[in-house]
Amino acid sequence: MEHFETMLLVAAVLILLGLYCVIAAIRMKKTGKISSLIASSEEAAKCKKTRDLIEEMYLPFLGMGIICILFGGFSIIDKCYYAFPVVVRLFASLIFFGTCATVISRQRKVRRKYLNL
């Protein structure tokens, strides 16, 4: 597989991951059940403050999903239609990886706080 095709595949996977995160966040908020992205079903069953955990993780997961969708779309546009300047690509990458790091850090804190892990 060529580099071009690999990058398009990665971008498509990012868009799908973003959609999954958005759907999981909305479903979590709507049903009141903790997503398996945050905790396994056994861990979630032990949580005494499910609503509080969901409130703390809803926006970060929703934001992460939106950023994944945007970054995947940006990557496809960059590879297929318009080559963005290096500075723009670097800035987009920093936003994406910064969001990832922030959500992972937040998830660890929330898991420690509500699941005692």
Image (cartoon, grey):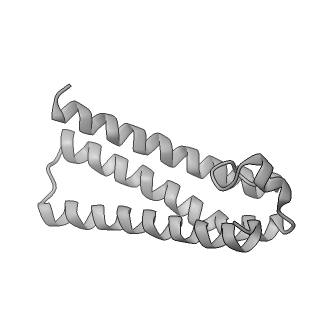
Q: Which residue appears at 15% of the width and 66% of the height?
A: 87
Figure quadrant of residue 7: top left
Q: Nearer the viewer, residue 70 or 14?
A: 14
Q: Which residue appears at 63% of the width and 47% of the height?
A: 23
Residue 102: give x, y in percent of width and height.
48, 70
15 on left or right of 77: right
Give the number of marks: 0
Q: Which residue appears at 36% of the width and 47% of the height?
A: 72
18 on left or right of 8: right
Image height of 15 relative to 43, above or below = above
21 on left or right of 24: left
Q: In the displayed image of the protein, which residue is found farthest to the right?
A: 48
Image height of 17 relative to 89, above or below = above
Q: In the displayed image of the protein, which residue is found farthest to the front?
A: 117
Residue 105: give x, y in percent of width and height.
52, 70
Q: Which residue appears at 57% of the width and 50% of the height?
A: 21
| The N terminus - image quarter | top left
Residue 77: give x, y in percent of width and height.
25, 45
38 on left or right of 48: left
Image height of 23 relative to 2, above or below = below
